[in-house]
Amino acid sequence: MTESQSFPAPATASAPGVKPMDAIMALCKRRGFVFQASDIYGGINGFWDYGPLGAQLKKNLRDAWWQDMIMNPCWGRKGPNGERVRCVPLETCIIQHPRTWEASGHVSGFNDPMVDCKETKGRYRYDHVMVYVPAGGEAGDKPVFAYVGDQPSESKQKKKAEKTFGAVRSVPLSSIPQPWARVIGPDAEKPGTLTEPRMFNLMFDTISGAIRDEANKVYLRPETAQGVFLHFKNVVDSTRVKLPFGIGNTGRSFRNEVTPRNFTFRSREFEQAELEFFCHPDESLDWYRFWRDFRMEWWKSIGLAGENLILREHDKDELSHYSQGTSDVEYRFPFTAPGFGELEGIAHRGCYDLTQHQTHSKVKLDYFDTTRGETLPNGGKKGERYIPHCIEPAAGLDRGALALICEAYTVDASRPSPEFLKLHPRVAPIKAAVFPLVDKDGMPEVAERLADDLFARFGRHGFIETDPKQSIGKRYARMDEAGCPFCFTVDGDTLKDQTVTVRDRDTGSQQRIAIDKVPGFLGERLGS
């Protein structure tokens, strides 16, 4: 039986300053940003489709990442080595050789313990339920319901447990005495309704070829990064790029999340934008700090500047055994407030991935660096062979698009249409709208010529809208909800003095400019 999901959002947040997620989701559907996948069949849990505006918003975000990370990395600035940052693109398949995922550790380690609830028919990660610690146990003389994993401090489960049992505390799984007396599910009314835990692999598997047997089983990739490591040697051999350099790619990944939730934040099919930056081990910490700081700066540059964006350095006990450092760019989404949710991770992966694939494939993936080693009599270098270290800035494009929408969502009760999106012009799906004030007296023809001119110049970046119908106020309101930054209105004076009215989305202010100055005005503000 296929899981389905309804479109209603989580409950509207009541805390001051927290934006209403249900209203944001309603706007996304109404204006064509995000739809349920398979909507006419009731939807399918963990999958979302992007409508016309959402598809263009996400493309603009992807293009901005591609331009600033690959084509013109870090806006042309120099890295810690004093040289311009160098990166090249790659595009890899969703399905790779299954041994890829054995080498990466996903086959053996990409598992979560799962339990089913006989009362609610829900399925949960076992480290997201509560375990009963009996009287006289580790928790003391009083019976206590303890969280196994981290839980929101104001969760429904915690409030219910405190009301029923009087005490709840967070403890690591290893510290809970066994056997456990009782276990309670997040939505259950009483303990003892959960099944025994069983391991659940998060990778989707399928069959490659005509024979449906275990020998032909392959996986949909759970991340795009591994394809880059597989082609490290090919890229080095086929290009003139020298270390340090990065290989970047974007694409779909798949994780069979047990409990997909929070709109597009956690879904089973999602898009990533990842860079694997390879460098000498001695320079790796400097490059880690460089990419950590730049990625934070980049998200600010496209509209997330403010108190909702933070950079969080992982504590040592959070790090993978091979990592020398990891930081997360985190955004305060309405459903995580007052806390934050991960938007991008910047990880120092050391030489772990290349070493793993070299071991499993028996193909040498080291690098011969002619700029290092002892100085020869002729002034050259003897050279040094080593396995590069890797710094990985890994962003989620779906989470990025959602963060941009949440940050842009604005309510101003004084406006005729109180809801609007203050999207940064670089990512806004509609770049401009051209309206005739009324649908007569030659105004539609002038507006259409101006719209055609703007489309020819800026259409590759997004939509240029034109619409002669309804009142000018309603047309402005539609553009505000869609996040269009500028509207140009052709009126009676245009026919006399060749000027138009420019309306700014954010302020609602208007000014007159010459019609032949419109392309320059818009291009300057779009950065193109």
Image: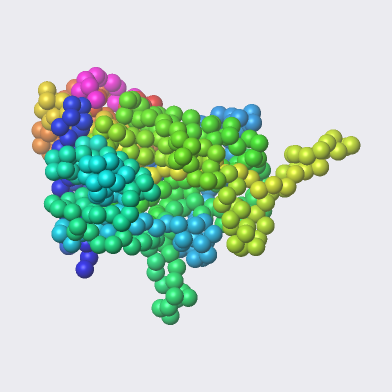
Question: Image quarter for residue 155?
Answer: top left
Taking 215 as reference, is 143 left or right?
left
Point out residue 32 in the picture as x, y percentages from the top left corner: 22, 46
Answer whether residue 206 is visible to the viewer in this image.
Answer: yes
Location of residue 515 with respect to 26 vertically, above or below: above
> Which residue is at the front of the view, 446 or 144?
144
Residue 137 image position (x, y, % from top left): 29, 46
Does the magenta run of residues contain 512? yes
Q: Which residues are magenta?
A: 506-517
Q: Is residue 343 above or below residue 505?
A: below
Q: Is 12 situated left or right of 198 in this image? A: left
As for residue 410 lying within the magenta part, the answer is no
- Which residue is outermost to the bottom? 211
Dividing the picture into quadrants, the one containing residue 288 is top right
Front residue of 292 and 114:
114
Question: Split into 4 quadrants, where in the image is the C terminus?
Answer: top left
Between 450 and 488, the one lying in front of the other is 488
Quadrant assignment, res 125: bottom left
At 35% from the left and 52% from the top, the residue drawn is 270
Q: Residue at x 41, y 48 (%)?
A: 272
Q: Is residue 50 visible?
A: no
Which corner quadrant holds the N terminus? bottom left
In this picture, is 265 found above or below 474?
below
52 sits left or right of 232 in the view: left
Q: Position of residue 75 (x, y in %)?
A: 51, 31
